[in-house]
Image: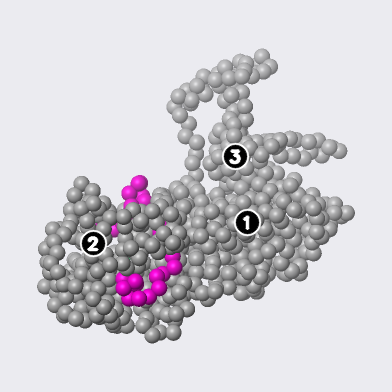
Amino acid sequence: MTTYITTPIYYVNAQPHLGHAYTTIVADTYSRFRRLCGDTVRFQTGTDEHGDKIVEAAAKEGVSPKEYVDRISGLFRDTWPLLDIVPDNFIRTTDRNHVLTVQKILQQVYDKGDIYFDEYSGQYCTGCERFLTEKELVDGKCPDHLTIPDEITEQNYFFRMSRYQQDLIDHIKANPEFITPERYRNEVLSFLSEPLEDLCISRPTSRLTWGIPLPFDDNFVTYVWFDALINYLTGLDYPGGEKFDPYWSVAEHVIAKDILKPHAIYWPTMILSMGLPLYQKLHVHGYWNVDETKMSKSIGNVVRPAELVEEYGVDCLRYFTLREMSFGLDASFSSEAIVARKNSDLANDLGNLYSRSTAMLVKYTDGVVPEPVSSEDDTVLRDLAVSVIATYKETMADFQFHRALQAVWELISQANKYIVTNEPWALAKDSGRTERLHTVLYNLAESLRLLTLLLQPVMPGTCKKMAVGLGLEEGSPLVTDLTSCGAWGKLVPGAELRKIDSLFPRVDAKKKKQPVKEESQKTNNKKKKQNHSLSEEGGITFDQFQQVELRVAEIVSAEPVNKSDRLLKLIVKAPEERVIVAGIAEYYAPEDIVGLQVLIVANLKPVKLMGVESQGMVLAAKVEEDGKSRLVLSAVSASVPAGSKVA
Ligand code: MSP
C-alpha cells in the first residue's frame, strides 16, 4: 500500500505556532502509523510565499519579499525537526519547478476555456487572501480575522468554478469518506446547495507583483490560492513525474476548518478542470484556542512549539496535542492541561509501569525476559491487549487519535492493575511459585513491547528508548511492524534488558503548601486550649477528631531518601500531588508500593526529614512480633478515587 499525506503550506507572514505544529504533528504521526502498517509513505509540508500578506510583512521588516520569505520559510523548516517531524518533502511556492507547474496548469485550464476575463467588485479580506461573499460576513466583518473587508472593483481573470459544481456535489454524495469528519462534509454540501460563483484567480500587477505571472497575460499575477493548492501536485513532479501515478491516486490532505472552502471547493473544481482524478480524502480538524479564542498571530495569543518542547519535551507535546484534541473539534491550550497530562498519563501511568516492570525484571530474573507458561489467569490482560490493538488500528486509520490513545491507556492501566493483583514481590518470596513469577514478568514485558510498538507514531523518541531498555535491536520488527508483530506473545524470552534513563521526568507542580485560612487558624488555637483539658478527661471530642484530615492517597512514585536506611520519599496523589516522607524503607521496596492506595494525614504542618520536605504522614499499623516491630501500610478495601476523604 502507498500513502501520500500533506499539510497545508503555511503562510510565511507569521512564525510557526501550536496551530501549525498540530496539523504537522498529525500528518507526521499518520505517516509513521502507515509505515508501521508497512506502507510506502510520502509526507509533504511546506510554505506558501506569495500574495499581499507577505509583501506587507516584508515591508514591515524593511526587507525585500524574497529575503523575508527565505527567512521565515527557514523558521518553519527548522521547527519540524525539533518536534521530531520528518517530512519527505518540504515545498516552497517560490521554488522554480512550482512556478513552472502553476503556469503549465493555468495555460491548460485557459486553453480549455475554463478561464475568462471580466470585471468584478467584491469584499476582499487580506487576511484570507480572497473575496468573501455577503453571506460569509458577520456584522460586516470577516469572522476569522474580525476585520472589515475592502470593497474592491477591478478587471480580472476568473475560473469557471460553477461549471464543476454538480460534479463535485455528486462526488461528495457518492463518497462519504471524501471530507471527514461528517460535520464538514455537511457544511460543504450546504454551501454547494446555493449556486457557486466563479473564482477570481488573478491580481493586476498594478496592485501586486509578488506572485506567479499568468502565462497568457503578464499584466497579472496568479491569485495566491490558485497558486498554493497546486503544491500538492508539484510535490509529485506533475506533470510527467514518476511519483505522480502511485501517490496522487492515494492523496490525503490534512487541514483545519479555516481553509475548508479552498480545499473542498476551489481545489476539487480545479482538479476536475485539469481532467485529473480527485484527491482521496480531506481530513479537517478544529482550532486550538486560548481562552475560547482561536490561536492566531493576528490575535496575538500564540504559543510557540519550540518553547513547549523546551519546557515539556517533544514527546509530551506530541502526546498532549493528539490526546487533548478530538480531531474535528476545537481544543483549549493551557499549561495546566499539558502539565496534568505529563504528570498523570506519562509519568504516572506509562512511566511508572515501565520503571516498575523493568525494575522487577532486573530484580527477579537478572534483567532477562523469562519463559512464560500459558495461564487462564492472564486472559483479561491478553484479551484486552488484542482488542486494544484492533481499536488502535481502526481509530488511527480514521484520524481519531485521541480514541487510539485512550485505548492504549486502557492497556497501560490494565497492566498496572495486573502488577497489583499478581504481586510479583510476593511470588518471588515463594520458591514454589517461580513459574508463575516468570509468567507474570513475561506478560509485563510483552505489554511494554506492545506499548512501544503502538506508541511509536506518537512518541518516536520515547519508544526508541523503551525498545533499547527492553533489549531490542534498533528497527526490530517487534516494535516497528504492526502487521507481523501487532499480536500478543511475539516477544521472545531471553532478551536482555538494558538500563535507560527515566522516560518522563516529572514536571514539578509548584509545591502547594495547603494555605491555612485565617478562620481555621483561629479555631485551631481555640481548640488547642480545649484539647489540653479534654485530654485530661481521657478522650477527644468529635470536633477534635475532625481537625485531623484523613484522605486516601495513591502512591505515584517511591524512592529511597539519600543517606537514610529508614526513609522513603513518596509522591502521592490525594488528589493533588504531594511529597510524603515515610519511615518504611526497612519493610517495603520502593517498586512494590507504587500504585497502592494508603491512608494519609493530609493537614499536618510540613516538616523537613533528611532535607526533604514531607507534606503529610502515611498511616501504617505497627505490628509487634517475636520481640520485633514492623510497619504494615494502611489500605482501603476497594479502589477509590485518590483524595477521597476518610470520614
Ligand atoms: N497558506 C494557506 C494554506 C494553503 S494550503 C494549499 C494558509 N496558511 S496558514 O499559515 O494560515 O495556515 C493555516 C493552517 O494552519 C490551518 O489550516 C491549520 O492547519 C493550521 N492552523 C493555524 N492556526 C491554527 C489553530 N489555531 N488551530 C489549529 N490549526 C491551526 O491558510
Callout 3 amino acid: Ala
Amino acid under disc 1: Val
Which residue matches tag 1? 388
Q: Nearer the viewer, mark 1 or mark 2?
A: 2
Q: Residue 270 at what x, y percent from top left?
A: 31, 71
Helix, strand or loop status at disc 2: loop
Quick check: can you spot residue 367? no
Q: Residue furthest right?
A: 432
* Magenta stretch in the rendered image: 270-298
Q: Is the residue under label 1 in contact with that under label 3 (CB below 8 Å)?
A: no
Q: State the residue in front, 22 or 497.
A: 22
Q: Position of residue 406 (x, y in %)?
A: 56, 52
Q: Residues within 10 Å of mark 3 (few under 14, many from 20)?
A: some
Which residue is identified by label 3? 642
Q: Tell me which corner region of the image, top left, top right, bottom left or bottom right, holds residue 487.
A: bottom right
> Could you say which quadrant of the image residue 126 lies in?
bottom left
